[in-house]
Image (spheres, rainbow, N blue to C red):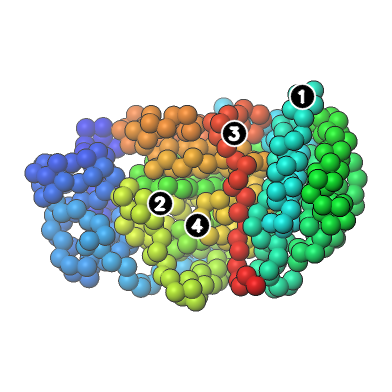
Amino acid sequence: MSAAARTVRLHPEDQVVVAKRRIPAGTALPEEGCIVREEIPAAHKVATRPIAAGEPIRKYGQIIGFAARPIEPGEHVHTHNVELREFQRDYAFGADLRPPVALAEDLPRSFLGFVRANGRVGTRNYLGVISTVNCSASVCHFVRERFPADLLELHPHVDGIVAITHGSGCGMAGSGEAFQVLARTLAGFVGHPNFAGVLLIGLGCEVAQVELLREQLALEPGPLFRTLTLQESGGTRRTVDRALGMLREMLPHADAARREEVAASELVVGLQCGGSDGYSGITANPALGHAADLLVAAGGTAILSETPEIYGAEHLLTRRAVSREVGEKLVARIRWWEDYVRRNGGVMDNNPSPGNKAGGLTTILEKSLGAAAKGGTSNLTDVLLYAEPVKTRGLVFMDSPGYDPCSVTGQVASGANIIAFTTGRGSCFGFKPVPSLKIATNSAMYARMIEDMDLDAGTILEGGAHIEEVGRRIYELLLEVASGRRTKSEALGVGDHEFVPWQIGAVM
């Protein structure tokens, strides 16, 4: 990538290039043999050759849309002259399987984690107060807020108390898809290795009963797992008092945990992007993809998600599926989403968001091609339902909406013990009890929001760093954070309100 060039060409077959910075009208692009006809905003696309009406428009060598009218060289290519149409994708299951990336000798292969009694490894050591239903949410927050800070300070090996609350748990059927999603999500958090202990609090008459969840987890009450309901405890104040007493009893047990060296194979990284821009698929996402490849080479697990944001790029993943069965599972989720969106009066191109479009992304196909780059080049070993526990190592896909808090909630429930989050527009995001590493796609936003961003991948754009070099740094930083280094979002205290289980179906 030339530092002097004003644009980035991603594939020889592309009819468009991406502006590295704002390009005024009349500017010559000698490397592309054309003159810019109108101002091109940074991260947006400019045509470099004539494109006929109806012709597929390519970026990354892949179709991102179709010309809504003839487009001349030098024209701005965006929502005003690009449209989405159906087109065939070649799923070619397993055609692009490849050996894993080699892990260089100088890269770390371990981190310091909390090994739990069941063998799972945490990257943080929290106590959790989890509500089964919205009706117990306030009590959970009261408990967290009223727990004596001085008592926590006497137990320095405990990272704090997290209240996990949500707006569901009742007004729904007690069986079926919607209930199963919520039950899997809550179960994933109750058993998450970043919690040393959990207090589960319900109202008492809700659909998502405390006892039902306890039975699903096969957990018996003990020093690090307790349950309460407001109705049995005598109401709000008495429940809070009882809960505070239970947490006091849990605290010394949680404080006894110590970090110990474990293999990098115990790291489960949720791959996420939010507030994406035209640089996401050029800098941060492929760099994170390389980091994911390195983690997989070390025996670890990377979870790619956001099904609406791989739409149109799913064929790049099915071609790397370890079996036809795995590839077909991904296609089945794509078909489910097409039906789900249709039933609710939408279209798949409702995504990208206005902010994505302002940042240079035109269609869901273009956004998806950039988002899929987070998955690197590793083989796809499994496809999971939302919040379904991870069963295989390597690169896995978990079905979820593209809405970041909802998607990350599912990834953490599935077992992610750290999140790597890329952003171009500047998402301010954290997610307790799991640390979230924020990676900026461009240096201007990184400088503007440096208190929220952990790493600048924008150096790739100006030729100052290679994708592989930044990917190595992300991999190293993931292990450092897993070992206890605090992220920017943790330092700011962000992450108490991002638990958003996916609500499917009727609310009654």
Of badges 2 and 1, nearer the viewer stands 1
Sort mark 2 into few (<14), some (14-19) or many (20+) by Cα contacts within 10 Å: many
Q: Which of marks 3 and 4 precedes in the sequence?
A: 4
316 sits left or right of 47 in the view: right
Q: Distance between the residues labelled 2 and 3?
A: 30 Å
Figure check: 78 above or below 56: above
Q: Residue under label 3, please give it.
A: 493
Mark 2 vs 4, N-terminal side: 2
Q: In which quarter of the image is residue 222?
A: top right
Instruction: Tell us which disc is closer to us: 2 or 4.
Output: 4
Q: Earlier in the sequence, mark 4 or mark 1?
A: 1
Query: If the image is split into quadrants, where does the C terminus sit?
Result: bottom right
User: Of the residues tagged 4 and 1, which is closer to the observer?
Assistant: 1
Q: Mark 2 points at which residue?
A: 370
Circle 2/circle 3 CB separation < 8 Å: no
Q: Which of marks 2 and 3 is nearer the N terminus?
A: 2
Q: Which amino acid does label 3 sit on?
A: Gly
| Residue 387 spot, x, y in % from top left | 66, 58
Q: What element carries label 4?
A: loop
Q: Can residue 153 be seen in this view?
A: yes
Q: Mark 1 points at which residue?
A: 150
| Image coordinates for residue 479, horizontal then vertical, percent | 61, 33
Disc 2 residue type?
A: Gly
Given contact means CB atoms under 8 Å apart, are the residues at marks 4 and 1 in contact?
A: no
Q: Residue 402 has which mark?
A: 4
Nearer to me, 421 or 448 = 448
- Tell me which residue sits at (86%, 43%) in the image: 242
- Dot 3 falls on a residue whose secondary structure is loop
Name the side, left or right, on which 328 lies relative to 38.
Answer: right
Nearest to the observer: residue 423 or residue 5: 423
